[in-house]
Amino acid sequence: KAGVTQTPRYLIKTRGQQVTLSCSPISGHRSVSWYQQTPGQGLQFLFEYFSETQRNKGNFPGRFSGRQFSNSRSEMNVSTLELGDSALYLCASSLGTLNNEQFFGPGTRLTVL
Amino acid sequence: AQKVTQAQTEISVVEKEDVTLDCVYETRDTTYYLFWYKQPPSGELVFLIRRNSFDEQNEISGRYSWNFQKSTSSFNFTITASQVVDSAVYFCALSEVTGGGNKLTFGTGTQLKVEL
């Protein structure tokens, strides 16, 4: 079974731009969660989508948004990029039942200049 | 609010030594789940174990073992006879049932270096 895939793997943007990251979950998984990893703040939960609905949300500004499609693929968008948004963005998928183990993708490394 | 503390920032051992990674958590929930993940230099988080709050049995999987003690809110991870391939950052994480989703709260991680 293929694992979680994320595209692109690396991205360089400038301040003020917007960016869209994509995540394809493991086949059969209906929940997709997004996390931001930075050296200063560590791993932080952004949001979770299940059956095309946001089920849970972390403490991030509204510039961070996401969506999930009917095939469970998910995208996250960051608008008006700031230097502090430079991070590794990790996507995780799980079956969908609560508190199940989550399987992570390789991440998208975003650099904001 | 939930919190996970991994006090050991970095541990260095020589191959074949045993090593224990500590994890202490805080939660108001009576039902919760604890996890350990491994992050090798490639960056991808690898799932190691999930344990629910009602199951305090220790678990062993090959060279890995986990000790869950509710009385001290700890969920420690021991690697027996460490190998160079065990070098990675290890994260402990907590998921609460009342959160209504799959939100993981991570500790800050412990960097394990295993040298020859």
Image: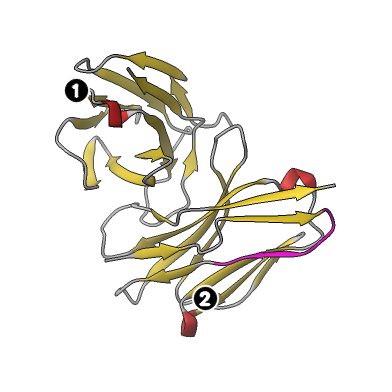
Q: Position of residue B105 (x, y in %)?
A: 37, 56
Q: Which residues are magenta?
A: B15-22
Q: Chain of mark 2?
A: B
Q: Is residue B21 above or below residue A55?
A: below
Q: Is residue A111 visible?
A: yes
- Which amino acid, by three-letter code, is at mark 2? Asp
> Does residue B67 belong to the magenta stretch?
no
- Distance between the Cα atoms at labels 1 and 2? 43 Å
The residue pinned by badge 1 equals A79
Compared with A27, A97 (above or below) is: below
- Horizontally, residue B62 falls left or right of residue B41, namely right
| Mark 2 crowd level (few <14, some 14–19, many ≥20, 10 Å Cα) | few
Q: Is residue B114 left or right of residue A29?
A: right
Question: Which chain is mark 1 on?
Answer: A
Q: Main secondary structure of the magenta part?
A: loop
Q: Which residue, given by chain and number where applicable, does mark 2 sit on?
A: B55
Report x, y in % for residue A76.
Answer: 28, 28
